[in-house]
Image (spheres, rainbow, N blue to C red):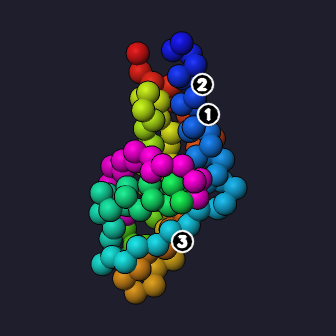
């Protein structure tokens, strides 16, 4: 039974990754040259949900995103079973106080810790 849950979670994470890769997720946020880690996590979660048609995933980002083209940060998507999927956020442009960024999920998930 545990493997069935893991398979479902892995499928769910794969659906998020495939959806993010196929659609070429992009998002933007109004900020003052920096987007807080919490706000970034919310923006990424909302964009992934909109792109995949799935509920908003649990996203955490370790640091603020500086509004400078080319800046990247890594966020983490955590599934209900504890498995994780890395998400890379890259600033593609800055228009005044608006940071536009791309979101790319990793191809494979990491299993839940035992």
The magenta stretch is 51-65
Q: Look at the image and say whether residue 103 sits in the magenta stretch.
A: no
- SS under mark 1: helix
Mark found first going from the N terminus, 1 or 3: 1
Mark found first going from the N terminus, 3 or 2: 2
Distance from Cα at disc 1 to Cα at disc 3:
29 Å
Instruction: Kindly identify which residue carries mark 1.
Output: 11
In contact (CB < 8 Å): disc 3 and disc 2:
no
In contact (CB < 8 Å): disc 1 and disc 2:
yes
Instruction: Kindly identify which residue carries mark 2.
Output: 7
**Predominant SS along the magenta part:** loop
Left or right, 114 with reference to 52: left
Quarter residue 113 falls in = top left
- SS under mark 2: helix
Quarter residue 104 falls in = bottom right
Question: What numbered label is drawn on residue 92?
Answer: 3
Q: Quadrant of the C terminus?
A: top left
Distance from Cα at disc 3 to Cα at disc 2:
34 Å
Distance from Cα at disc 1 to Cα at disc 2:
6 Å
Residue 107 percent coordinates (x, y): 63, 41
Residue 33 percent coordinates (x, y): 34, 76
Which residue corresponds to the image point at 54% horizontal and 71% vertical from the top-left?
92
Q: Residue furthest right?
A: 22
How busy is the neighbourhood of tag 1: few (under 14 within 10 Å), some, or many (20 plus)?
few
In this rendering, the label closer to the viewer, 3 or 2: 2
- SS under mark 3: strand
């Amino acid at each position: 039974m545990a493997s069935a849950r893991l398979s479902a979670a892995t499928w769910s994470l794969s659906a998020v990754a495939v959806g993010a890769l196929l659609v070429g997720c992009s998002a933007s946020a109004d900020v003052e040259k920096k987007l807080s880690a919490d706000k970034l996590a919310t923006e990424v979660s909302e964009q992934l949900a909109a792109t995949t048609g799935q509920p908003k995933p649990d996203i955490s980002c370790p640091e603020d995103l500086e509004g400078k083209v080319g800046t990247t940060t890594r966020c983490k998507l955590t599934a209900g079973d504890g498995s994780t999927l890395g998400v890379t956020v890259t600033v593609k442009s800055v228009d005044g106080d608006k940071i536009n960024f791309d979101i790319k999920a990793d191809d494979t998930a990491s299993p839940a810790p035992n």
